[in-house]
Image (cartoon, rainbow, N blue to C red):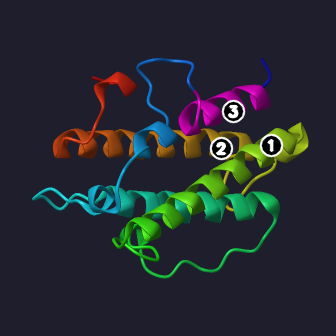
Amino acid sequence: MSPKQLLLEQFRTCYNGTNWYWFVNLLTAIDSLTAEQAAWKDNSTNNSIWQIVNHLIFWNTRYLNRFKGIPVQEMKGDNDSTFEGERINGTDEDWYNIVQQLKDVMSDWENAIKEADNIKLEEKPIKETDGTWASYIGLINTHNMYHIGQIVTLRKQQGSWDKSKGIN
C-alpha cells in the first residue's frame, strides 16, 4: 500500500468508513443529533458537540486551503476561539447547516487527497517545518479521531448514543 493509499484509507475510516466495528467514524458520531443535543454541555468546562464540530470545520478548512494553495488569513485568537465558530447553538436547521459545512470540507479533503500526487504529499505545508503534507494529513486524521471520541463520550453522557453503532 502506498503512503497516499494509507492516508486515504485513514481519512475515510475517520470520516465515513465502516471497516472496523469498534471504530466510530465522524458521520456516525454525529448522526441523528438534534440541535439541542449538539449544544448540550455537561457541568464541566467541556465543549459541546456543536463547538467541537465548529473546531473541526475551522482546522480542516484551514489546512485544506493550504493544501490547495489558497492563502489562509492570520489566525485571530487562540485555539479555544476555534470552538466558537459561527454558532455554538441554534435551531435544528442551524445544526443541519453546520453539519453540512463539515461534510463539505471533509468531502473536499477526501477528493484532494485522492487527486494528490506523491510530489504534493512530500511538500512542506509550512516553510518553517520539517514535516511533509503526508505527515500533516496523518496528524489531521489523528486530530479528527480524537474529537470523534469526545463526541461519542458526550453522547454517552447525555444518553443519546446508540450502542449498536459501536463502542458500547
Q: Amino acid at mark 2?
A: Ile
* Of 5 and 152, the residue lying toward us: 152
* Residue mark closest to the camera, 1 vs 3: 3
The tag earlier along the polypeptide, 1 or 3, is 3
Residue 104 vs 7, above or below: the answer is below
Q: Are marks 1 and 2 in contact (CB under 8 Å)?
A: yes
Q: In the picture, residue 52 is in which quadrant?
A: bottom left
* Of 89 and 128, the residue lying toward us: 89
**Percent x, y of residue 121:** 80, 43
Q: Are marks 1 and 3 in contact (CB under 8 Å)?
A: yes
Mark 1–mark 3 Cα distance, whole angstroms, equals 10 Å
Residue 91 vs 33, above or below: the answer is below
The segment highlighted magenta reads: 3-17
> Would you name the residue on which mark 2 appears?
137
Callout 2: SS: helix
Q: Magenta part mainly helix, strand or loop? A: helix
Q: How many residues crowd mark 3 within 10 Å: few (<14), some (14–19), many (20+)?
A: many
Report how many numbered discs are placed on residues in the image. Answer: 3
> Would you name the residue on which mark 3 appears?
7
Q: How many residues crowd mark 2 within 10 Å: few (<14), some (14–19), many (20+)?
A: many
Q: In the picture, residue 105 is in which quadrant?
A: bottom right
Task: Say if the magenta span includes residue 149.
Answer: no
Q: Is residue 153 visible?
A: yes
Q: Amino acid at mark 3?
A: Leu
Callout 1: SS: helix
